[in-house]
Image (cartoon, grey):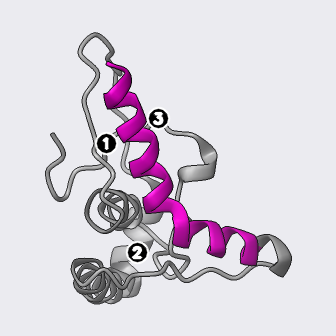
């Protein structure tokens, strides 16, 4: 079961993955925002795999961690995260993106509007088959 603040490994079809918000640059909460959007605003159920596992090898802190902290960006990202969390709780969050290929962006934006309904429909179909 998903708990706020965790960054689970996700396996899902690319067509259902929401865009990352481009304002979340640096080291802080970018994946958490994406998971919150999926779990809370879009209503995607996140389940643990009973027999699967992932090994996380210890590693040094990411190079951009120190740069994010030292530049003051950490506080900016925290403020942005609080704003995004509020928007997600209201069901109003849309990731900020900028693409050179506007046609692709528009298609993705339209698809994102229908995403929740499509996912729910597929999940319901699977439940009926069981």
Tag 2 secondary structure: helix
Dot label at residue 68? 2
Question: Is 111 displayed left or right of 121 in the figure?
Answer: right
Q: Residue at x 47, y 81 (%)?
A: 94
10 Å crowding of disc 3: few (<14), some (14-19), many (20+): few
Could you give the CA–CA distance between mark 2 and mark 1, rounded to whole angstroms? Answer: 22 Å
Is residue 30 or residue 52 the one in the foreground? 52
Residue that carries the numbered disc 1 in the rendered image: 8
| Relative image position of residue 74 (x, y in whole percent) | 32, 80
Q: Residue at x 51, y 61 (%)?
A: 115
Tag 3 secondary structure: loop
| Relative image position of residue 91 (x, y in whole percent) | 30, 80
Tag 1 secondary structure: loop
Q: Earlier in the sequence, mark 2 or mark 1?
A: 1
10 Å crowding of disc 1: few (<14), some (14-19), many (20+): few
Residue that carries the numbered disc 3 in the rendered image: 11
Is residue 112 or residue 34 the one in the foreground? 112
Residue situated furthest front in the rendering: 128
Is residue 3 or residue 94 the one in the foreground? 94
| Relative image position of residue 93 (x, y in whole percent) | 39, 82
Nearer to us: label 2 or label 1: 1
């Amino acid at each position: 079961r998903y708990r706020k603040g965790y960054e689970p490994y996700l396996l899902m079809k690319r067509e259902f993955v929401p865009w990352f918000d481009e304002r979340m640059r640096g080291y802080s909460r970018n994946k958490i925002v994406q998971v919150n959007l999926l779990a809370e605003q879009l209503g995607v159920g996140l389940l643990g795999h009973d027999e699967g596992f992932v090994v996380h090898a210890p590693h040094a802190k990411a190079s951009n961690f120190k740069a994010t902290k030292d530049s003051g960006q950490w506080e900016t990202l925290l403020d942005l995260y609080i704003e995004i969390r509020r928007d997600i709780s209201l069901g109003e969050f849309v990731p900020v993106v900028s693409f050179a290929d506007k046609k692709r962006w528009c298609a993705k934006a339209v698809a994102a509007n229908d995403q929740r309904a499509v996912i729910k429909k597929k999940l319901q179909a699977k439940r009926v088959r069981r």
